[in-house]
Image (spheres, rainbow, N blue to C red):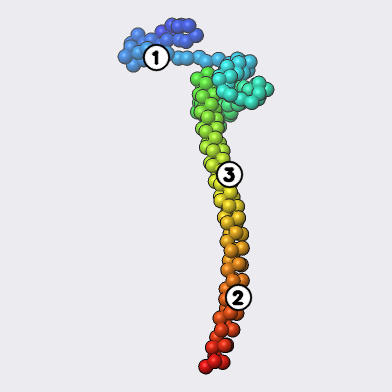
Amino acid sequence: MNLCFSPVGDKFRIRSRMFPGLIGSTTIDYFHPWPRDALIGVANKFLAEIDLPSEELQQTLSEHMAFVHQIIDEYNKKYKAMERRNNYTTPTSFLEFIKFYKSLLGDKRGKIIDQIERLKIGLQTMEDVGNVVADLQVELDETMKVVAEEIEATGKIITVVDEQSADAAREQ
């Protein structure tokens, strides 16, 4: 088979003279790894869109993301040596990594905000219940005073009734 390699930018286009339909317009992309500074710069650009507590945290996250992306290349080489299969990391996979981080951070922040709201509602409910219990305690104290007075009055009435019963029994 007669193959023709024609450069197109940083890619090569392969054409077959005998079987043009077999290879067609197949393109081989040669990706060179991004330098660490470029990875950090890209990560910083995308992390700037996120509300982070400090610039230092943003810088640390960017450096960690660059480290993770670069370490994957090393493990890809080990994977190829062990399994004889290729695994590629590309600039697109780095961008997907950043996108996934932003998405995961947004989800976690949303869950935390929901939990904070639930706790606020719970605390407010507990405060309301505490106020109702305090009001009921005051009402109970007043009712207990009235009950004590009624018991005393009932005791006097029982004493009078007992005396009158005794007098009625004597008269009979």
Could you tell me if residue 52 is visible in this image? yes
Left or right: 19 as drawn, with respect to 154: left
Residue on which the image places disc 2: 156
Q: How many numbered discs, if any?
A: 3
Tell me which corner region of the image, top left, top right, bottom left or bottom right, holds residue 149: bottom right
**Farthest right residue?**
56
Residue on which the image places disc 1: 26
- Classify 161 as above or below 83: below
Checking the image for residue 123, the label placed there is 3
Graded by Cα atoms within 10 Å as few (under 14), some (14 to 19) or many (20 or more), the crowding at tag 1 reads few
Rendered location of residue 6, percent (x, y):
43, 6
Graded by Cα atoms within 10 Å as few (under 14), some (14 to 19) or many (20 or more), the crowding at tag 3 reads few
* Residue type at numbered disc 2: Lys
- The mark closer to the camera, 1 or 3, is 3
- Classify 17 as above or below 170: above
Residue at image position (60%, 16%) is: 41
- The mark closer to the camera, 3 or 2, is 2
* Tag 2–tag 1 contact (CB < 8 Å): no
Residue at image position (34%, 16%) is: 22
**Farthest front residue?**
171
* Residue type at numbered disc 1: Thr
* Tag 1–tag 3 contact (CB < 8 Å): no
Checking the image for residue 77, the label placed there is none
Q: CA distance from mark 2 to mark 1?
A: 111 Å
Rendered location of residue 10, percent (x, y):
50, 9
- The mark closer to the camera, 2 or 1, is 2
User: For the N terminus, which image quadrant?
Assistant: top left
